[in-house]
Amino acid sequence: MTDFKKPYLAEIEVREPREKEVMVKVMCAPINPSDNYFVIGQYGNIKKFKEMPVGVGFSGAGVIEKVGKGVSESLIGSRVSINQMPSSPGYIGTFRKYTYMNVKSIYPFPESLSFEDIANSMGANPITVAGFMDIAERDGHSVFINDAAASSLGKMFSRYCIKHNKTLINIVRRPEQVKILEDDGAKLILNSGDINFEKDLKDMIKKYNPTCFFDAISGDFPGKVLAMMPEGSTMYVYGALSMKQMVNVDSGGLIFKNHTVSNFWIPTWLKNTKKEVLLKWMQEIIQDMVEGGKVFGSKVIKSFPIDKFDEAMQ
């Protein structure tokens, strides 16, 4: 396996921004599970990186210090949210003092929001919720199941569905996670650790008829859920929190119940989504953050300086 030890140590030369680029002084960058998996070489196409070390960090917040040719100087000093993915040309990561972005990849935010408020506002979690809803509606689904539902992403997805009166069945692993979602207003919550979990899930599926399942776990669990779902259901795999690379699915469901297994990855969705659709979601996310982040806000548990990277990633 590629040696991804301490990839954040990759340094870049502080230079003038190129055409259509902005130079951003990074003030804050969140750590998501995708960052942890990238560090150990299990996220994205790691073979594209020919030399180690490489940068880490897919999103963040900062201030534009310089602009390149073709970019208005009025942007200098703007507080922005930034988003970089390892599939992007010229990826260098956001876990550093300065990074360089195409001007189309930065999103200005009002001064009233802190850097911690906006660091992940255009990153993995809000954009993933946008992608979930876009592909679900495109494929004709209206009732959903989500596992790992007490994660930051899961809570955003749940709050979005509550706000927009959409039916979502949330699956968690522990009793305290049930309480977390209840406090957020969720009603349909199942604990996979309960002795009656499978019966309760079957009953809930029969009542609400979900045909769309977003899986962040991989391994054996998601296939068991999909097998209980109605004919024509689709499972979208977007994570592997079980650390298992294979998803085991009942072949009978694929053949006789017309079940489908698909995938979701932010770069692919962004690449295939029309500009006006992205703009609609950006406006909704920004408006929510300005109003207090009731849907897309994230709670910061702890902050670390960049030289405490190892401790932060544990």
Image (cartoon, rainbow, N blue to C red):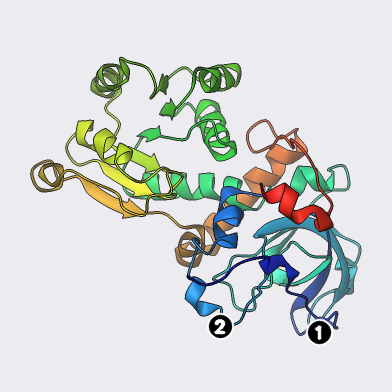
Q: Which residue type does callout 1 highlight?
A: Lys
**Other residues around mark 2 within 10 Å, as few (<14) / some (14–19) / many (≥20):** few
Relative to residue 69, is residue 181 depicted above or below?
Answer: above
Q: Position of residue 37 (x, y in %)?
A: 54, 56
Residue 21 sits in quarter: bottom right
> Is there any visible trace of residue 80 in the rendered image?
no
Q: Position of residue 105 (x, y in %)?
A: 68, 66
Task: Choose between 264 and 252: the one closer to the eye.
Answer: 252
Q: Residue at x 83, y 58 (%)?
A: 307
Disc 2 is placed on an element classified as: loop
Answer with left or right where residue 233 lies relative to residue 115.
left
Q: CA distance from mark 1 to mark 2?
A: 30 Å
Disc 1 is placed on an element classified as: loop
Say if mark 1 contacts mark 2, CB within 8 Å. no
Q: Which residue is mark 2?
A: 50
Among the two numbered marks 1 and 2 on one chain, the one whose residue lies closer to the N terminus: 2
Relative to residue 107, is residue 155 depicted above or below?
Answer: above
Relative to residue 38, is residue 242 depicted above or below?
Answer: above
Q: Which residue is mark 1?
A: 69
Answer with left or right where residue 139 lies relative to residue 45.
left
> Is there any visible trace of residue 106 in the rendered image?
yes
Q: Residue at x 69, y 72 (%)?
A: 92
Q: Position of residue 119 (x, y in %)?
A: 74, 50
Q: Residue at x 60, y 21 (%)?
A: 184
Numbered mark located on residue 101 in the image:
none
Q: Position of residue 71 (x, y in %)?
A: 80, 77
Q: Nearer the viewer, mark 1 or mark 2?
A: 2
Q: Which residue type does callout 2 highlight?
A: Lys
Residue 210 sits in quarter: top left
